[in-house]
Image (cartoon, helix red, strand yellow):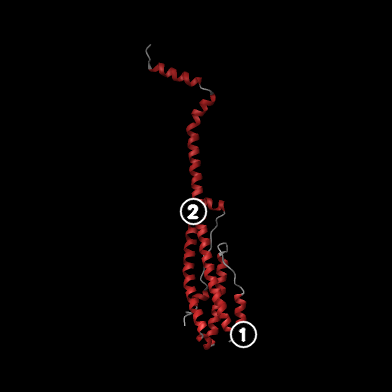
């Protein structure tokens, strides 16, 4: 029997007609379903990857803010020691310093930037009062304990300046990622919001050097 092209075409038609309706539908939709599954899988992987990047930067922001808290605690401790030194020179100013130091709060990774800025303002206010007292009482300024404590404060100031720069750099990276397309589309879905930056108090910008 001669097997012509028409013969093979007839065999293909016959085999297709013998397929069940389910098999025909599967053969027709198979490539489309595979493509759809692939697209969904890629989308899910992208969402997971983007969420992990946001989480990583969010944790870095919290860690940087907690470092600010550590530096502030060291400065609060030094301010407390300086306040004790002023007690024998000026009771009124000492009581004022105690009131300011009473505003001390611990800053952690879960604290807000506004809380850290408020603590920075309180520290700056207390330091300004101590410096004013030391200018009025030369004996206080010449005290060995005062000098040693002020040296520590100067070192803490350098540390907190570096910590503030690191924190704001990290906040910048985080906020930039939140604004970038396409990450911005999923940031809100997972509760990621824009973060504020740490500020340098105006009083500190105008404050003279604390070195003797």
| Residue 44: image tag | none
Disc 1 crowd rating (10 Å Cα; few below 14, some 14-19, many 20+) is few
Judged left or right of residue 112, residue 10 is left
Q: Is residue 68 above or below residue 101?
A: above
User: Of discs 2 and 1, which sits in the foreground?
Assistant: 1
Residue at the image point whose x is 51% and y is 29% from the top: 26
Q: Nearer the viewer, residue 211 or 112?
A: 211
Name the residue: 51% across, 61% down: 61
The residue where tag 2 is placed is 53
Residue 22 percent location from the top left of the image: 54, 26
Picture residue at 37% right of the left edge, 15% below the top? 4
Report the disc number at residue 91: 1
Q: CA distance from mark 2 to mark 1?
A: 54 Å
Label 2's element? helix
Q: Does 29 appear above or below 17?
A: below
Of residues 87 and 177, the one drawn nearer to the viewer in this rendering = 87
Between 197 and 88, the residue placed more toward the observer is 88
Q: Quadrant of residue 21?
A: top right
Crowding around mark 2 (Cα neighbors within 10 Å: few <14, some 14 to 19, many 20+) is: some
Of callouts 2 and 1, the N-terminal one? 2
- Provide residue 2's location: percent of width, then percent of height: 37, 12
x then y, percent, for residue 58: 52, 58
């Amino acid at each position: 029997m001669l097997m012509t092209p028409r013969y093979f075409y007839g065999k293909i038609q016959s085999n297709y007609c013998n397929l069940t309706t389910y098999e025909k539908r599967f053969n027709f939709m198979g490539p489309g379903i595979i493509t759809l599954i692939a697209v969904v899988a890629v989308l899910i992987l992208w969402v997971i990857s983007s969420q992990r990047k946001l989480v990583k930067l969010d944790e870095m922001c919290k860690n940087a803010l907690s470092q600010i808290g550590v530096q502030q605690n060291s400065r609060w401790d030094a301010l407390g020691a300086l306040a004790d030194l002023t007690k024998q020179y000026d009771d009124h100013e000492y009581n004022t310093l105690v009131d300011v130091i009473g505003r001390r709060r611990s800053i952690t990774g879960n604290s807000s930037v506004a809380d850290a800025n408020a603590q920075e303002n309180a520290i700056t206010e207390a330091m300004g009062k101590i410096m004013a007292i030391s200018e009025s009482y030369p004996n206080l300024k010449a005290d060995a304990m005062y000098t040693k404590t002020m040296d520590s404060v100067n070192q803490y100031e350098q540390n907190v300046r570096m910590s503030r720069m690191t924190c704001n750099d990290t906040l910048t990276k985080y906020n930039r990622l939140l604004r970038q397309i396409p990450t911005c589309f999923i940031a809100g879905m997972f509760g990621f919001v824009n973060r504020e930056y740490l500020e340098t108090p105006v009083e500190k910008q105008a404050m003279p050097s604390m070195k003797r």
